[in-house]
Image: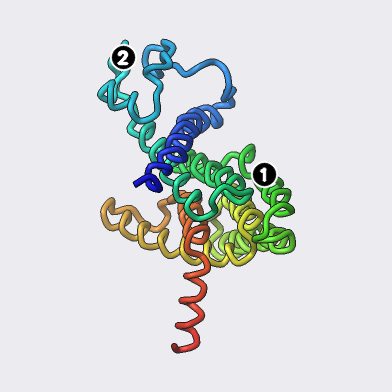
Amino acid sequence: MIDRIIYIIPFLFGAVVGSFLNVCIYRIPEGISIVSPPSRCQGCGRLVPFYYNIPIFGYIFLGGRCAFCKVKLSVQYPFVEALTGVIAVALFVKFGLSRELFAMFVFSAALIVITFIDLRLKMIPDVISIPGIILGVILSFFMVAPGVASSLIGMAVGGGFLLAVAAAYYYMTGREGMGGGDIKLLAMIGAFLGWRAVIVTVLTGSFIGAVIGAAVMLITGKNSKYALPFGPFLAFGAFLHLFYGDELIRWYLMKAAGE
């Protein structure tokens, strides 16, 4: 029981960080400072008191509405807070108190912000991905895995692979099928997780993206020219590798060997 109670600490820490990530998700695309001004209601503009800004519980207590103007609040707020808390617990279980825990939590936070911005606006801000590439390489000097060499190769392969795919798609169709943000995102994933993560991320992300894309076309009746943001699928693939990468690679090698 005591062992399980300790998980409350990383969850609460993650939820608090998730509250800040919500600020980043809404303000970064607008070019607004993520530090000032304090949180305000997007309906009436009034400052949100700290006791209404408690992660998850504030939303539940208010019934999902502003305390003043009663405008409906997005469910994204508690979802991102809870998601960040769960990921913090999962990282704590996997890495314990270590440098890897710190590095992968920063990486995960960046993926969460990128995912929700891309879902909402179909864009991936350079202000996250480019510093993320640099930070991933720097942190590789202080971690056992993936190591500096794998980080550098992952950065180069990740960015270069999607750049080649984008160029080939444009050559064959005359249309842009992948934005520069996706290319930089995969480079960031490679910098943090190494070159093997690029393979797992692309394969799993593309597969999930194709399945969901086909389902969306069937449900909405839109044709293949309808663009889905690819960033969230790359982020999903990166999370898969982060937690299950070695198992996925071993499973694939066993299948390829016919075992």
Does label 2 or label 1 sit earlier along the sequence? 2
Query: Residue 130 has which mark?
Result: 1
Tell me if residue 136 comes above or below residue 198 in the rendering: above
- Mark 2 falls on what kind of element? loop
Query: Residue 67 has which mark?
Result: 2
Name the residue at 56% across, 65% down: 172
- Type of amino acid at the residue the image marks with label 1: Ile
Residue 67 seen from this side: yes
- Type of amino acid at the residue the image marks with label 2: Ala
Name the residue at 45% across, 50% down: 90
| Position in image of residue 62 (x %, y %) | 28, 21
Q: Residues within 10 Å of mark 1 (few under 14, many from 20)?
A: some
As drawn, which residue projects farthest toward the front?
Answer: 2
Tell me if residue 216 comes above or below residue 206 in the rendering: above
Q: Nearer the viewer, residue 220 or 210?
A: 210
Quadrant of residue 15 in the image? top left
| Position in image of residue 117 (x %, y %) | 48, 38
